Amino acid sequence: MGYDGSEGAKKALDRAVTMVKEGDEIVVLFVVPPAKIEEFVGFDTDLTVEKAQEVLDEVVDSLEESGIPVTSLVKEGDVAGEIIELGAGLECDLIVVGSYGLSKVGAFALGDVAEEVAKKATRPVLLIR
C-alpha cells in the first residue's frame, strides 16, 4: 500500500488492516518524490528518505504490536510509478491507496497519483476516501 503519513493514507492503512487474513502481509511503501515539491504539507519541504523511514517505523511498530506481518519500503521516484511497479513485482493481491495525500491542493496533485495507480496498475486497486 502507498503511504505518506497523511490522513488519507492513515484511513487507507486502517482499511487494509481490516482486510488482513491469516497468512497475509502488509507491504507499506513511502515514495519520496525526486525533487522538493513545495505543495507538500505535514513535512519540511526537504522530505528525505530518512524522514520517510521514521514515519514508516511508527507504522511498522503499531502493526507488529497488533500481530500483523508488515514490511516497509522507502523509494525515491515517481510516486504512482513506484507504487504500480512494486505491486506488479510482488504480485500483490491488492494495492490500497488513499485518494488524497500530503498535497495542499488535494485531488489535483496527489489525487492524480491515486487516479494514475487505479488506471495503470496491473493488480487490483482499492482507493480509500
Image (cartoon, grey):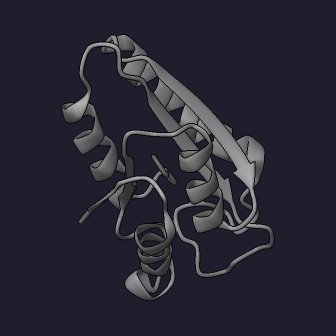
Q: Which residue is at the front of the view, 45 or 23? A: 23
Q: Quadrant of residue 50?
A: top right
Q: Position of residue 64 (x, y in %)?
A: 42, 15
Q: Quadrant of residue 126?
A: bottom left
Looking at the image, which residue is at 40% across and 69% down? Answer: 118
Looking at the image, which residue is at 31% across and 50% down? Answer: 12
Q: Quadrant of the C terminus?
A: bottom left
Report whether 1 appears left or right of 74: left
Q: Is residue 115 above or below residue 128?
A: below
Q: Is residue 76 above or below residue 106?
A: above
Q: Position of residue 82 (x, y in %)?
A: 65, 57
The furthest residue to the right? 35
Report whether 43 appears left or right of 96: right
Query: How many numbered marks does the figure carry?
Result: 0
Q: Position of residue 14 (x, y in %)?
A: 26, 41
Looking at the image, which residue is at 50% across and 34% down? Answer: 27
Q: Which residue is at the front of the view, 99 or 117? A: 117
Looking at the image, which residue is at 56% across and 58% down? Answer: 84
Q: Is residue 87 above or below residue 33?
A: above
The furthest residue to the left? 18
Q: Position of residue 20 (x, y in %)?
A: 26, 27
Report whether 43 appears left or right of 125: right
